[in-house]
Image (cartoon, rainbow, N blue to C red):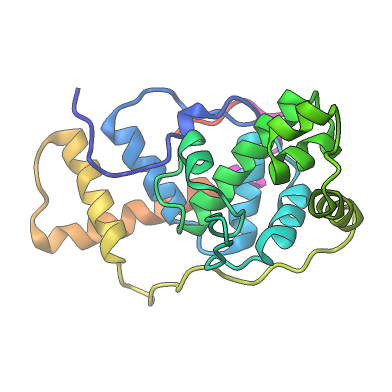
Amino acid sequence: MFVTPIQTMDLTQVRDGYKVSSGGSGFHQAMQQAALSGLSDLESMFTYASRATGVPTDLLKAVAKAESDFNQNCVSHCGATGIMQLMPETARSVGVTDVNDPAQNILGGARYLRKMLDRYNGDTTLALAAYNAGPGAVDRYGGVPPYAETQNYVRKISCMLGGAISVPLSAYSVASAGTVPAAFGSALSEILEAVSGQDLLSGSTALFCEGLKNAVQNQLMETITRDPDEEEQTF
């Protein structure tokens, strides 16, 4: 089986909310990378992550606000990185290959928060405490650890829930109209290779990439606006 060298998040790990086809082919992996690359604003990233994991959008935004104030360049003294402040080991555990990519970072944080919610039977307070202090500390104390930082963290996010959370417009520099970003073009070229094993002529590569980019973005918008009670999505 051909496996594309494109580094992607393994979206087939998702176990809740919308599920993605588990065909682990290079084509599916490249399509998933293209899908994430098609997200150009934070609102779409949070909506996509919420639909993929079943974690409420407002909870994801509140965590991001508390963790980094939506600053993708934020790095803590202990090495947590990005909008959702993922530690390297945590990022790897949820399939993040580029912690500096906003879309991957948000989806990775959503996946980890989903794990914590499942671990504590949907208890948001305990899940948030575990996100901040680690599940080991929550288990050790049988509840929210007696750490001022963690207690303030849980209180801060709880106060934000239900209110309006202002999200910055964009995390990416949107490409000029009519152009195909180099990384995106490369990913889509590898999609073609995965499908047919043949390279595109240089003149047709941009046309193919642009067309498939538009198709992927349309698929994303359908996913974002889709009724949660409908059937599973597949890429």
For the question of whether residue 177 can be seen, the reply is yes
Q: Residue 147 appears at what percent x and percent y?
A: 82, 47
* Horizontal relation, residue 212 to residue 48: left or right: left
Residue at position x 55%, y 43% in the image: 108
Quarter placement of the C terminus: top left
Residue 167 location, x and y as percent? 70, 67
For residue 189, side relative to residue 184 (left or right): left
Give the vertical position of 131 relative to 181 (above or below): above
Q: Is residue 230 magenta?
A: yes
Could you tell me what secondary structure mostly forms the magenta stretch? loop
Viewer can see residue 222? no
The answer to which of 213 and 122 lies nearer the viewer is 122
Q: Is 121 above or below relative to 194? A: above
- Measured along the vertical axis of the image, is residue 156 above or below residue 150? below
As rendered, which of 233 and 4 lies closer to the eye? 4
Apparent side of residue 174 relative to residue 78 in the rendered image (left or right): left
Residue farthest along the bottom direction in this orientation: 176
Q: Quadrant of residue 211?
A: bottom left
> At which x and y percent is residue 105?
53, 51
Image quarter of residue 2? top left
Residue appearing at x 84%, y 53% in the figure: 148
Image point 69% across, 67% down: which residue? 69
In the figure, is residue 120 to the left or right of 185? right
Q: Which residues are magenta?
A: 222-231
